[in-house]
């Protein structure tokens, strides 16, 4: 059965979509079958994998019209990497789901029939803590939190932690924190080094060893609809996400993992 991971941070611009695309591609390069579910109405994960504008079922149809996930899955240009795409239609899903039965678990229930087909499912969450994000947390076994190495890095983590704990307590008791990944790191700046130090002091062993560098090549790759290992396999970004994928595989293979705790503490 697939290991389902929600890539989560309510702040925008922290590297959630970049991590979903490139971690997924690097896991696929390690021989794993990977499905990315684009749960952000902006659809950046979809366009970043070159599938923007493709017609057919999307995650909106899965959540609001009871479409099967298998009917919405698209292959990408990367072998063993698949996507359930998103469009701007998903922006209306939060309103439509308010009166729906079992609204918090629509995604989890829809994914059950396809979990045996993949090794990993990555959920690219929107920059909010609304109903779409709650669906992701209810569906996931793991939470992975990208934190950018910039001034406001730790802002809002207390609220994020409370939301995760509420989901764990009331909707998904098996939810676990996989770890925190530092993104947009520039070792030349004192600020990046200080933020990285503060995050490691706060989270300790829950911080991934791999650090994702600030990289022009990482920023360019989505505009070509490619993950970094396809766009520039020799770049620092490609190397970093390859190492992150290996860490994720190692953690996922362990039989025991840390329970979710409040990231704000």
Image (cartoon, grey):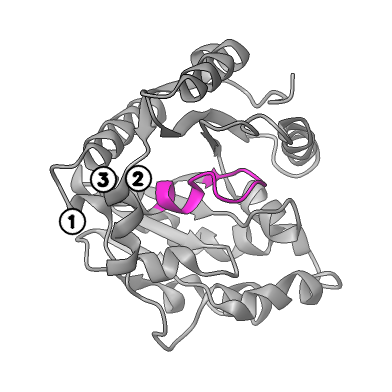
* As drawn, 177 above or below 140: above
Is residue 2 something that shows in the picture? no
Residue under numbered circle 1: 230
The stretch of residues the image draws in magenta is 6-20
- Tell me the number on the disc at residue 23: 2
CB under 8 Å between callouts 2 and 3? yes
**Residue 179 in the image: above or below residue 96:** above
How far is disc 2 from disc 3 in space, using C-alphas? 5 Å
Q: CA distance from mark 1 to mark 3?
A: 10 Å
Of the two numbered discs 2 and 1 on the same chain, state the one appearing first in sequence: 2
Q: Which residue is mark 3?
A: 26
Which residue is found at the position 50% from the left and 13% from the top?
205
Tag 2 secondary structure: helix
Residue 240 shows in this picture? yes
Tell me whether the residue at label 2 lies in contact with that at label 1, contact meaning CB atoms closer than 8 angstroms: no
Q: Is residue 206 magenta?
A: no
Pinpoint residue 27: horizontal percent, then vertical percent: 28, 44
């Amino acid at each position: 059965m697939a290991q389902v991971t929600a890539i989560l941070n309510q702040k925008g611009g922290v590297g959630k979509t970049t991590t979903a695309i490139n971690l997924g591609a690097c896991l696929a390069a390690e021989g794993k079958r990977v499905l990315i579910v684009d749960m952000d109405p902006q659809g950046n994960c979809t366009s970043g994998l070159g599938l923007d504008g493709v017609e057919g079922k999307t995650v909106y149809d899965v959540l609001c019209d009871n479409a099967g996930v298998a009917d919405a899955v698209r292959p990408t240009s990367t072998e063993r990497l698949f996507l359930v795409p998103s469009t701007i239609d998903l922006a209306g899903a939060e309103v439509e789901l308010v009166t729906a039965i079992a609204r918090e678990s629509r995604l989890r229930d829809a994914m059950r029939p396809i979990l045996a087909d993949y090794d990993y499912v990555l959920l690219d969450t929107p920059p909010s803590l609304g109903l779409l994000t709650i669906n992701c947390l209810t569906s996931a076994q793991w939470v992975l939190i990208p934190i950018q190495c910039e001034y406001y890095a730790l802002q809002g983590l207390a609220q994020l932690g409370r939301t995760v704990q509420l989901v764990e307590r009331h909707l998904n008791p098996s939810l676990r924190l996989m770890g925190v990944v530092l993104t947009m790191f520039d070792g030349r700046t004192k600020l990046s080094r200080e933020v990285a130090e503060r995050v490691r002091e706060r989270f300790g062993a829950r911080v991934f060893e791999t650090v994702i560098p600030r990289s022009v090549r990482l920023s360019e790759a989505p505009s070509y609809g490619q993950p970094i290992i396809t766009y520039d396999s020799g770049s620092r970004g490609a190397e970093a996400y390859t190492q992150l994928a290996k860490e994720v595989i190692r953690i996922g293979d362990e039989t025991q993992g840390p329970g979710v705790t409040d990231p704000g503490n």
